[in-house]
Amino acid sequence: MGPPNAGKSTLLNALVGQKVAIVTAKPQTTRNRILGIATDARAQIIFMDTPGVHSLRGQTRGHLGKLMLQAAWQGLNAADAVALVLDGDLYLRKPEFLERDLAPLLPALRGDQAVPVIIALNKIDLFHDKSRMLPLLENLQACFPQAEIFPVSALRRDGVDSLLTLIGTRLPEAAAQFPEDQLTTAPMRFMTAEIIREKLFERLRQEVPYAVAVAVEEWQEDPERGQVVIHAVIYVARPSHKAMVIGRAGEGIKAVGTAARKEIQDLLQAKVHLELWVKVREDWIDDARFLTELGLGAEAV
């Protein structure tokens, strides 16, 4: 768990050892609870990557934002331990943001019924003066007296293996729930839609990415040609957004399709024929029925 843009998905991918959650520089990229599974000779750890937790005021984008926040809290209720991921670089530069980001988390994570908490202080590779870290560590320890604080760089994998070992010691013993080679419960259709959305997030600016959703409508495997034919729809909330996604002379949608197809082929280990369409669905982020159909805010299974 953690605030938006703290690096939760990057850390999940590092802990699992393979990309199972999309990652962009924009906050609130994750919309579902995504399970990542790390198995070695010592333990099998099931991670839930949750949407960013924030205060409702000013940061919730329609009904979608509320579903994302609900998904995060439901993940907490199902957890045996919490890795609280915080952007250490942000709080060194802007210490006043720490109180803001911890406000919605503190009551749930340090109550009498709270689960064990490990604080993953992320992005330490960006620390130019590590001597300034001490006041931040002291502040966090005061907020979470029982928590262990573990500085990491999810991007560079610094400290990730040691963090994985520590998390394993804080979990109850039980039989493994998944085969040792399984890395996630998310189906290929979901992963494919997420890859397309990731490429859209990387290309689009300002508010447009948050009004974009992707649904895979057709999936056909063609053994004779050795390829998978995928048709996906990109939903936008306004006609002006459709023009931005398509781009001048179709340049935008072509670039997204090319980048997505390469990554989907690596995922499926097969040739992929990918076709994308853009449809306008006015104010879909407030359409509860449509959000349910897309499976947003739920667990990716």
Image (cartoon, helix red, strand yellow):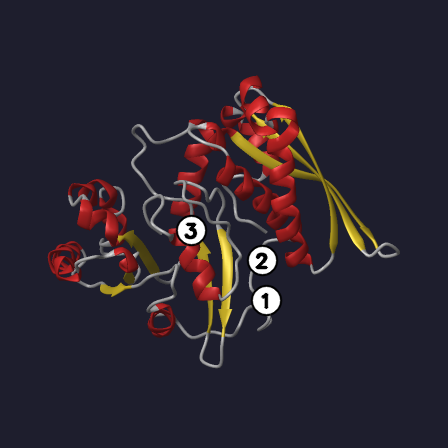
Which mark is first along the chain, 2 or 3? 3
Can residue 126 be seen here? The reply is: yes
Label disc, if present, on residue 75 of the rendered structure: 3
Between tags 1 and 3, which lies in front?
Answer: 1
Contact flag, marks 3 and 2 (Cβ < 8 Å):
no
Q: Which residue is mark 2?
A: 185
Identify the residue position indicated by label 1 in the image. Answer: 182
- Kind of residue at badge 2: Thr
Q: Identify residue type, mark 1.
A: Gln
Q: Say what secondary structure mark 3 lies in.
A: helix
The reply to whether dot 1 and dot 3 touch (C-beta < 8 Å) is no
Q: Look at the numbered disc 1 and give the secondary structure of its residue.
A: loop
Q: Position of residue 132 (x, y in %)?
A: 13, 57
Quadrant of the image occupied by residue 152? bottom left
Left or right, 293 with respect to 35, comes to: right
Seen from the viewer's position, the closer of residues 125 and 76 is 125
Q: Position of residue 225 (x, y in %)?
A: 86, 54
Task: State the residue in front, 6 or 251.
Answer: 251
CA gap, disc 3 and disc 2: 15 Å
Q: Is residue 292 above or below residue 154?
A: above
